[in-house]
Amino acid sequence: MDKDRIEGAAKQAKGSIKKGVGELTGDEKMKAEGQAEKAAGKVQNTVGGAKDAVRDAVHGKDRG
């Protein structure tokens, strides 16, 4: 598994928590930061998934 997938998932989780705290406390800035961090994590996770797919495709061709 690509490290971007792991870091992206962690960033998504952190963003979700931050967003939730922002919602609970009424802190719109924290809520927005959480949403942005969650979105960035999702992108990073997607990039990691693409890297994994490319790596699997390359290794699959090498073995075949």
Image: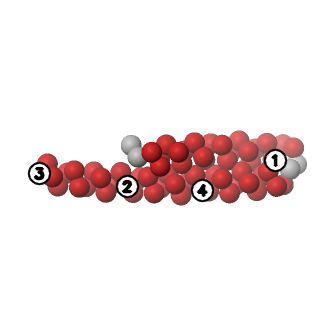
Q: Nearer the viewer, residue 3 or 14?
A: 3
Q: CA distance from mark 3 to mark 4?
A: 36 Å
- Check whether the beta carbons of the residues at disc 3 and disc 2 lie within 8 A of each other: no
Marks 3 and 2, the one that precedes in the sequence? 2
Q: Amino acid at mark 3?
A: Gly
Instruction: Count neighbours of disc 2 (C-alpha within 10 A) and say few if under 14, some if 14 to 19, many if 20 or more.
Output: some
Residue at the spot of label 3: 64
Q: Residue at x 74, y 48 (%)?
A: 19
Q: Is residue 62 left or right of residue 41?
A: left
**In the displayed structure image, the side of residue 60 where residue 48 appears, left or right:** right
Which numbered marker is on residue 23? 1
Instruction: Give the residue at the far left of this rendering.
Output: 64
The answer to which quarter of the image holds residue 32 is bottom right
Q: CA distance from mark 3 to mark 2?
A: 20 Å
Q: Which residue is mark 2?
A: 51
Say left or right for 19 vs 14: right
Question: Could you give the CA–CA distance between mark 3 and mark 1, rounded to whole angstroms?
Answer: 52 Å
- What's the CA distance linking mark 4 and mark 1? 19 Å
SS assignment at label 2: helix
Name the amino acid, label 1: Glu
* Residue 47: percent from left, percent from top: 45, 57
Real-space Cα separation, disc 2 to disc 1, in angstroms: 34 Å
> Which amino acid, mark 4?
Ala
